Image: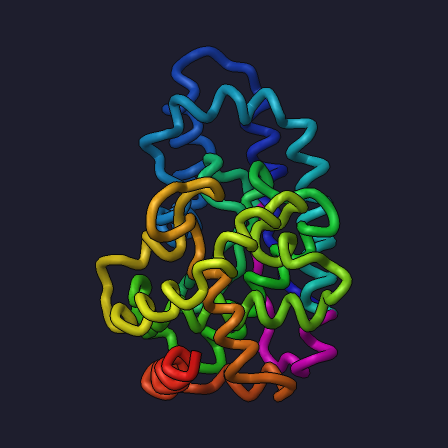
Amino acid sequence: MASILDLVTNFDDFAGQGRGGDLADRWWREFVKPHAEIFTAVESWVDPKVAPDRLPGLVARRTELRAAAERARFAIQEAERLLTEQLGLDHPIHAVVMVGLGQANGWVSSVQGEPTLFIGVEQMPKPPFDIVLALHELVHLVHMLRSTHDWPADRVDADLFREGLAVHATARLLPEVSPSGHLWFSTDAQAWIDRCKGMAARLRSRALQELDRTDVSGQWFSGAIDRPGELPGRCGYWLGWQLLDQILGPEPIETALGWSLPEAAARLRTALSQG
């Protein structure tokens, strides 16, 4: 059973106090500092600089966020069940359900050296996509446990493999969910998928040239669904999924979890070269 730390209750207590004074300052003193270890681990996803603008709206949503926390806990437990049936998880799963600042819905980070799954309930998608999100992040966590902790954060080949593997896994374990749901946790991404498909050859050619770059990952893995230009926003998720389908086929997901980065990169290069 996953060990889930619920910080939404703490946020709800903070939000319900209604004291005077600067809201962001109180948030820092009463919520962040008592959980400094957690917030140090999530600083890439929860930026205190946006707190003054974001906190009033989050405080107003406290009832909604409590309900979202219940869904998040269930989604993590369901994701653990699905992946355990596939892999036979042999390591305790640690998770944190929290109110972030609206910058990410889910991620994995290390807390005291322990890979930990985080769900930001203020950004959590609606059912059934909440389970897809939790499963996606749990695949990242298990990959971190099975491979190494030192894969680079912003290298194109590492991100293509990681994100492609997570989407490949959720699509295999939740086949009833549409491709849009696996890629954007929603139902309205078909036009974006069609755009990616239409430029697949260009995406493959460009990725092959940029596999070892560390300065362009944001162009592949961030951006809005309707971003204009040469690369659709987050198109690396779509391309990574296609590549992992190509590399793994029907082989067990577990096959790919222990590959080193050089092994994974070599397989990506071969798949991209084959077209």
Question: Height in image: 157 above or below 176?
Answer: below
Instruction: Determine the residue positioned at 72% across, 37% down.
Output: 67
Up the image or down, 166 lies above or below 255; here it is above
Which of the image's four quarters has the C terminus?
bottom left
Considering depth in this image, is 270 or 29 the residue closer to the camera?
270
Count of numbered labels shown in the rendering: 0
- Residue that protrudes farthest toward the top in the picture: 20
Is residue 152 something one can see in this rendering? yes
The residue stretch that appears in magenta: 82-97
Residue 125 figure quarter: top right
In-front residue for pair 112/176: 176
Q: Residue at x 57, y 47 (%)?
A: 191
Task: Residue 108: tell me if it is visible.
Answer: no
Name, please, the residue furthest toward the right.
176
Q: Is residue 77 above or below residue 73?
A: below
At horizontal 56% and vertical 84% (from top left) the residue drawn is 248
Image quarter in which the N terminus is found: bottom right
Horizontal and vertical percent for residue 48?
Answer: 35, 34
Residue 90 appears left or right of 145: right
Residue 271 location, quadrant: bottom left
Give residue 232's position: percent from left, percent from top: 42, 50
Q: Residue 143 versus residue 255: which sits nearer the camera? A: 255
Of residues 191 and 248, which is closer to you in this image?
191
- Residue 49 in the image, given as x and y percentages of width and height: 32, 31
Residue at 49% over, 43% down = 225
Residue 167 forms part of the magenta stretch: no
Q: Position of residue 89 (x, y in %)?
A: 64, 79
Q: Is residue 84 magenta?
A: yes
Q: How is the image coloured?
A: rainbow
Q: Left or right of 40: which side holds 70?
A: right
